[in-house]
Image (tube, rainbow, N blue to C red):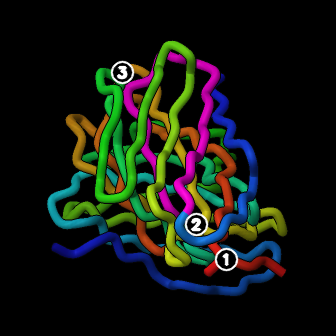
Amino acid sequence: ETGVTQSPTHLIKTRGQQVTLRCSSQSGHNTVSWYQQALGQGPQFIFQYYREEENGRGNFPPRFSGLQFPNYSSELNVNALELDDSALYLCASSSGLAGFGGELFFGEGSRLTVL
Amino acid sequence: KQEVTQIPAALSVPEGENLVLNCSFTDSAIYNLQWFRQDPGKGLTSLLLIQSSQREQTSGRLNASLDKSSGRSTLYIAASQPGDSATYLCAVRGQGGSEKLVFGKGMKLTVNP
């Protein structure tokens, strides 16, 4: 069974640039969630995708957007990067009914540094 | 708004001790609660999931309990080992199977040989 994989593992961008992070869900999982974890903090929910549609969003501005593909993999896009976007971005997959309630399994994360 | 608290923020103990990690949440209307482990700079590893109808779950040396009415969960680690050193986070999912988990800030555990 393949776990959740994320790429890239580390990246450095400058303020104002755009970034795309990628996630492959665990085999058999149809739901992908994205979380942002700042240093020393717990992860914060960004959004969730189920069957290629966003079905939940946290308190993040519209410049955070995402996609889910037919194979359930997902992308997180962040436009107009700000210094405060520097964080570990975590992808999680689950297989709950209609995207809700299932146990979450996380990837290793993508560490984004914005200079 | 659900808030999750883990106190203390850090704990250092000698090897072999039995440990109790605490997690409290403000809204008792939860669907489930999940405990995670995070090694430095890494992702989260799921340790235990407790549904709201359950009182406890066990996996090896780990036992998690849930008292939904009082808004508390504890993670018990038996016979701690240096390899248990990590940050432990608890997270709750709202009733109805809300799409998101609400996390605490975590507790950094150091087990000294």
Which residue in the protein does label 1 denote?
Answer: A112
Where is mark 2, residue-wise? A89
Q: Magenta residues?
A: B17-37
Residue flagged by tag 3: what amino acid is it? Gly
Look at the numbered disc 2 and give the secondary structure of its residue: strand
User: Residue B87 appears in which quarter of the rendering?
Assistant: bottom right
Closest to the camera, between mark 1 and mark 3, is: 3
Between the residue at mark 2 and the residue at mark 1, the CA separation in whole angstroms equals 7 Å
Q: Which residue is mark 3?
A: B96
- Percent x, y of residue A90: 52, 64
Q: Which residue is at a point 43% across and 76% down the rendered structure image? A: A6
Q: Position of residue A66 (x, y in %)?
A: 47, 57
Q: Which mark is residue A70?
A: none
- Label 3: element kind: loop
Badge 1: how crowded within 10 Å, few (<14), some, or many (20+)? some
- Can residue A29 be seen here? The reply is yes
Q: Closer to the camera, B18 or B54?
A: B18
Q: Chain of mark 3?
A: B
Count of numbered badges drawn on the protein: 3
User: On the same chain: label 1 and label 3?
Assistant: no
| Protein chain holding label 2 | A
Q: Is residue A63 above or below residue A96?
A: below
- Do the residues indicated by labels 3 and 2 lie within the same chain of the protein? no
Q: Which sits in the foreground, A56 or B62?
A: B62
Residue A38 image position (x, y, % from top left):
72, 61
Query: Which residue is at the front of the view, A83 or B17?
Result: B17
Magenta-colored stretch includes residue B26 = yes
